[in-house]
Amino acid sequence: MGTAHEVAPWLDWPRDAAGEWLLAGRPLSQVVAEVGGTPCYLYDRSRIDARVATLRSGLHPRVLLHYAVKANPMPALVCHLARRVDGLDVASAGELRVALDAGARREHISFAGPGKGGGELAQAHAAGILVNVESPREVDLLARLSESTGRAARVAVRVNLPFELRASGMKMSGGARPFGIDAEKVPEVLARIRATGLRFEGFHCFAGSQNLRAEAIVEVQARSYELVREWSAELPAPLRTLNLGGGFGIPYSGRDAPLDVGPVLEALNALAERSAADFGEDSRLVVELGRYLVGEAGLYVCRVVDRKVSREHVFLVTDGGMHQHLAASGNFGQVMRRNYPIAVNGYPGGEGETVSVVGPLCTPLDLLGDRVTLPPAQPGDLVVIFQSGAYGRSASPRDFLGHPDVREALV
C-alpha cells in the first residue's frame, strides 16, 4: 500500500508522470511555492464548482441549496460560493460579517446557534437576516429589538427534533440537546412569536452531520417534513422556508463507502413536489450543506523536517500538526480515531514502509498519521492530507505553543 489511491480508492486527484499530485492542473510543489510554502491549506475551486453543479442538476427548483459557513469560513472561499449557492448559513456575528463581505444577499442569510448574545442578535436584526431562534429568550430579545427599531425581526424556529439522524458522526437532535426548541414546546413558541409580532418565516431542522447512509438521511428529512406539517394550523404566518438541514458526509478512510446522494435528492424532490400544496406556492425547502460542498476539495500540505527512528519505528516529523488540523489528529470529537487519507508527494508508488506522521508539538496527541504505509520519505518531502477542505484551520487551536499560522489559498 504505497499510494493514497491504494489506501483510499475513491480519491480521484490526478498526478503527473513524476508522481506529483496536481492541483488546478499544476504540480503540487509549484502551487505550494506560489502560496509561500508549508504548512498550507489548498482548496480547489473547480472541485467545489463540480460538487455544486452536480447537486443543482439533481435538485427540484423548489429546493434551495445553502452553504454552512462554519465548515470553512475562509473569506475567498465563501465569496466564491456565495455566487453559486442560494444562501449562506452562519453561526456567529463573525461569520455574518464574512457572509456580508462576500456579497451574499441579506434575505438569503440565516443565523443559527444556541448561545446568541444580545449584541449578535442586534447585529443580525440590523442586517435584516433570518434568525433561527433557539429559546424563548431569543424571541423576547428580538421582540424588544423590533419594538425599538419599528421593524419586525425575521425569525424561524430551530427544532430539537424528537428523533435523531441514525449513524451520523455528530447527533444534533433527539433527547436533551442544547440546540433548538424541543418539538413539544414549538406550538407555545409559535404563539409567542405571533403575540410579539415577529416576522415568522419557517423552521430549521438539523438532525446531525457526517452521515454516509442515504436511507438514514431520507428518513430524518421525511420525518422532519411531516412534523412541521402537523403545525400548519398554528403558524403565525405562511411558511416561506423549511430548512431540512444536511448531514451529507464524505469518506475519510478506506472503510468508508461514499454517500450515494441519488436517493437523497430523489426523496427531497418528492417532498418539494408536495410542498406547494402543503405550505403554499411561495414556500421553499432548504438543504444546508458544509462539509459535503468543500471537504473533498481541500488539501493540507506540510513538509517533513526530520526522520526519526525510535525502537525500530519510523516517525516523520513535519512542520504542521494538530494545532492546524485538529480533525486529522482525531481530537475533533471523533469517537474513534481514523487516519485521513495521506500521501507523500512525488512518489508514483512502489514499496512502502510503516511510519507515523507527527507534528512539532510537545504532546503525543500531535499525530497526523498513525502507523500508515507510505513511500520512504526524507526531510524536505511534502506530506499531503486529503479530505481537508472542511473543519480544518478554523476548527484548530492555532495559537497552541506559538508556532507560525498556516497559510490558506483558493486555487
Image (tube, rainbow, N blue to C red):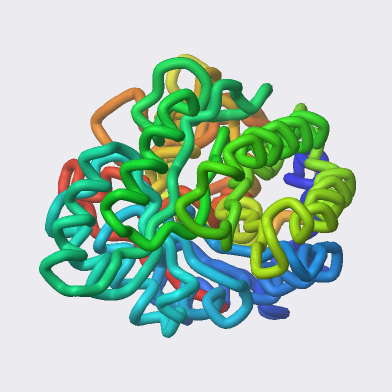
Position of residue 297 relative to residue 260, above or below, is: below
Q: Return the x and y of residue 58 as percentages of the image width and height.
A: 85, 63
Of 258 and 363, the residue lying toward us: 258
Whether 246 is drawn above or below 173: the answer is below
Task: State the residue at coordinates (52%, 66%).
Answer: 42
Q: Residue at x 16, y 65 (%)?
A: 147
- Identify whether 9 is placed above or below 281: above
The residue nearer to you, when weighing 239 against 59, is 239
Which quadrant holds the N terminus?
Answer: top right
Is 126 left or right of 158, judged from the image as shown?
left
- Position of residue 271 relative to residue 26, above or below, is above
Q: Residue 364, percent across and down? A: 34, 23
Q: Is residue 39 visible?
A: no
Which quadrant, please, contains the C terminus?
bottom right
Image side of residue 68 versus residue 297, left or right: left
Residue 214 is situated, as x and y percent measured from the top left of the image, at 80, 36
> In the rendered view, does 69 fall on the left or right side of 24?
left
The spot of residue 349 in percent (x, y) is 79, 48
- Name the residue rendered at 59%, 32% in the picture: 339
Tell me where residue 197 sits by quadrant. bottom left
Front-most of 344 and 8?
8
Would you say residue 339 is visible in this rendering? yes
